[in-house]
Amino acid sequence: MNTQTILQTYIDSIIQINTPYGSGSGFIIDDLIITNAHVVSGLKEVLISAKKIKRQKATVIYDDQVLDLAFIVLPKIELSNPLKLATDLVQDGDIAIAIGHPYGLNYSTTEGIVSKAERLEGDLEYIQIDAAINPGNSGGPLLNVHGKVIGVNTFILLNTQNLGFALPYYYVREAIDAFKKVRKQNIIRCPSCKNLIDESTIREDYCPQCGVKLEVAKQRRLGYRPSGTVALIEKILAALHVDVTIARESQRSWKLRQGSAHIDINFYENGIIMADALLCSMPHHNIEAMYDYLLKENDAFNYLLFSINDNNVILSYLIIDSSLTFEDGKIGIARLIKAADRYDDILIEKFGAIRPKRDEDEF
């Protein structure tokens, strides 16, 4: 199969994974979502989305710091063309196809060759490829021309060009088989003794087999805990009945959707908190009348402001972190949500403004 056919055939099995610390990729094998342990960042709860999976919370039930693998609970989903792990040996010069979400660019696909089928790094063998992979590709599948998974895209060498490495499929199969043999969820693999540890048997974050400190056990137990202004922003969003975990894009950014309103909230390093709603693009006609309308509405606003950037009409709520209070923040964001859901329709219907194009994969 060619690259385009492979993507179209198996796209439903490709998963996007988000945590407060970043994003990555994953893929479905059997009844599990497979990804890298560094993608889930030691958390027990992550966000997943896919063509047939609406953005939702999911549980990490296996964290293996040795192989840099993690397994996530798969929601109920029907796949017409499920991915399968390869069984044939990978050879130097084989075609390799990487699929993932680098930098959040959904379903990016690159093709290259296997530069070295068995490249030893530490105690593990990796598949070295020249297919371009970038941050966000981690955890995604590396496929052969038959659409079989030959590896998990795991890391790149910095300051090099097209030097990527994938964990071979046989390590993945061994990990899946060992995990299923335990017949329990919430398993951590100890990086010292290499045993699979039932999380419920861990006391004070120490491995019950060898006694080594398990940092990942502590991370999973504590979870993500925002502080300071970030915690205040999330408290405000929760008071507005926003599912904060679903809305969270990173530690300092959130994405909301209500009705036709799409709102991005960002907390910048300089202390500015900006909540923006992209409403529409300026029309080809009625431009002067629309300008007059926007200026008039701005005069009547409290908390909110219309602006035009690159021909796009944006409704914003802006505040400095030192001035943010729970009450003011709640009022400002609540007004932005309500107004954005109303004004986009007004500007489009009354003045012929152009509805913005949105990524079809956006939640």
Image (cartoon, grey):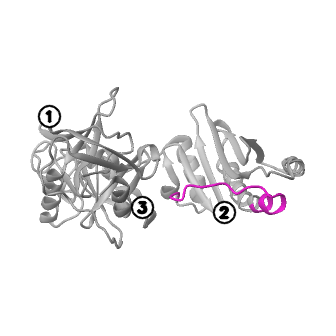
Mark 2 element type: loop
Q: Quadrant of the N terminus?
A: bottom left
User: Residue at 38% of width from left, 40% of height from top?
Assistant: 135
Q: CA distance from mark 1 to mark 3?
A: 34 Å
* Rendering coords of residue 102 (x, y %): 41, 44
**Left or right: 8 with respect to 255?**
left
Tell me if residue 179 comes above or below residue 101 in the rendering.
Answer: below
Q: Taken as a whole, is the magenta stretch helix, strand or loop? A: loop
Query: Furthest-front residue in view?
Result: 2
Residue 7 or 350: which is nearer the viewer? Answer: 7
Most distant residue in the top direction? 159
Q: Nearer the viewer, residue 275 or 87?
A: 87
The CA span between labels 1 and 2 is 51 Å
Q: Residue at x 23, y 58 (%)?
A: 148
The crowd level at tag 2 (other Cα within 10 Å; few <14, some 14-19, many 20+) is some
**C-alpha separation, residue under disc 2 versus residue under disc 3:** 21 Å
Instruction: Specify the amino acid type for callout 1.
Output: Gly
The residue stretch that appears in magenta: 345-362
Circle 3 — which element? strand
Mark carried by residue 50: 3
For residue 122, the mark is 1
User: Mark 2 is on which residue type?
Assistant: Ser
Under mark 3, the amino acid is Ala
- Specify few, some or many for label 1: CA neighbours under 10 Å numbering under 14, 14-19, or 20 or more: few
Q: Is residue 291 visible?
A: yes
Tell me whether the residue at label 1 lies in contact with that at label 3, contact meaning CB atoms closer than 8 angstroms: no
Residue at x-position 50% and y-position 52%: 248
Coordinates of residue 277 in the picture (x, y in percent) = 67, 51
Secondary structure of the residue carrying tag 1 is loop
Q: Position of residue 92 (x, y in %)?
A: 16, 40
**Label whose residue precedes the other's in the sequence (1 or 3):** 3
* Residue pointed to by mark 2: 260
